[in-house]
Image: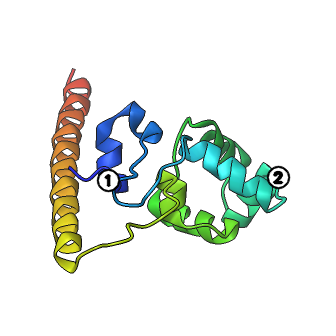
Amino acid sequence: MILNDPVTLLDVGADWDRFVDTANGATMIEETIGARIVQAREQTDLTTAQLARRLGVQSKTMAAWENGNSEPRSNRLVNLAGVLNVSALWLLTGQTGQPAHMDPDQELNQIRVQVEDVQAQLMRLSETMGTLVQRISDFENR
């Protein structure tokens, strides 16, 4: 398991945001994605409403992201990072540095593990989707 990639961190559970990976030169800030959004927004001197307007979302959506009640989808996350002048990786993980000595073989192996993790997540999501669709069908057939 690679603990400094956002996909794996999501699998680690609620404690992922407390992780500090100093072995390979990367560090994680002990915050949530919502706290990082607030921090970056405040540094750009924008209100929640102003940032929401720039992103084309409702203020209540922006507030939910900041409060940790929901998280932005990938396309919104990229836009959010651009408006706030931060990286999407930082918003997701709080990662403030990249590994200092990344061997190409190590990087390739990390990518392979990430792909496997994403595939496993997709399988779980597919199974969950099937279960939910079946439950809807069951309710409709009553």
Residue drawn at x 23%, y 76% as measured from the top left: 103
Task: Label 2, secondary structure: give it.
Answer: loop
Distance from the alpha carbon under mark 2 to that under mark 1: 30 Å
Between 79 and 25, the one lying in front of the other is 25
**What residue is disc 1 on?**
7
Residue drawn at x 49%, y 66% as measured from the top left: 75
First reached walking from the N terminus: tag 2 or tag 1: 1
* Residue 21, numbered circle: none
- Disc 1 residue type (three-letter): Val
**What residue is disc 2 on?**
47
Residue 68 placement, left or right of 54: left
Residue 65 placement, left or right of 26: right
Q: Quadrant of the C terminus?
A: top left
The picture quadrant where one finds residue 24 is bottom left
Which residue is at the far bottom? 104
Task: Label 1, secondary structure: give it.
Answer: helix
- Disc 2 residue type (three-letter): Thr
Q: Position of residue 22 (x, y in %)?
A: 40, 52
Q: Residues within 10 Å of mark 2 (few under 14, many from 20)?
A: few
Q: Position of residue 106 (x, y in %)?
A: 19, 70
- Which of labels 2 and 1 is toward the front? 1
Q: Residues within 10 Å of mark 1 (few under 14, many from 20)?
A: some
Residue drawn at x 29%, y 73% as measured from the top left: 102
Between 94 and 128, the one lying in front of the other is 94
Q: Position of residue 118 (x, y in %)?
A: 22, 56
Between 31 and 71, the one lying in front of the other is 31
The picture quadrant where one finds residue 128 is top left
